[in-house]
Image (tube, rainbow, N blue to C red):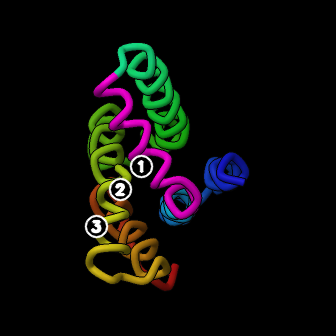
Amino acid sequence: MVAARHAEARGEPDPPGRLRRAAHWTRRQFELGADVVLVHQEAARADARVAVGWRAALEGREAAIRALLQPLAADLAIPVGEAVDLYVALTVAEVYRTLVLERGWEPDRTEAGLGELLCTKLLNAVCRRDV
């Protein structure tokens, strides 16, 4: 299901729409697996073999993010590499868990806020909620 959401985001030709779909992809990723992510993070700290697998998973996630953002290079307000860095930083499991589980945000609100933040910070275009 998460892979399908990523494919939908990559298929979106409108840059703000693409980033809003990416926010949905991120939401679904963490709704389904934030706890698994945290377990892997902790296990990677304790076991070098797990750490290798965890690093590979992170590299795969970064590659998926780069594949999402690279086609938007002409629309980005910053270089693609910086956009990837910012996207990665804003979409770690801890941010989702903090907002939803600790701060009581609804997943819809979290997704919408992430979509707006990505759109506003990454794109040269004016980003409106009604787009």
Which residue occupies 31% across, 25% down?
46
**Residue 123 percent location from the top left of the image:** 35, 56
Which residue occupies 35% across, 82% down?
105
Q: In which quarter of the image is residue 102?
A: bottom left
Q: Is the magenta stretch mostly helix, strand or loop?
A: helix
SS at circle 1: helix
The amino acid type found where label 2 is placed reads Leu
- 11 displayed left or right of 18: right
The magenta-colored residue range is 28-46
Which residue occupies 63% across, 47% down?
10
Mark 2 surroundings: few (<14), some (14-19) or many (≥20) residues within 10 A: many
Q: Which mark is residue 75?
A: 1
Q: Nearer the viewer, mark 3 or mark 2?
A: 3
**Residue 7 percent location from the top left of the image:** 69, 47
Contact (Cβ within 8 Å) of mark 2 with mark 1: yes
Q: Magenta stretch containing residue 21, yes or no?
A: no
Which numbered disc, 3 or 2, marks the residue that appears first in the sequence? 3
Q: Mark 2 points at which residue?
A: 123
Q: Which mark is residue 32?
A: none
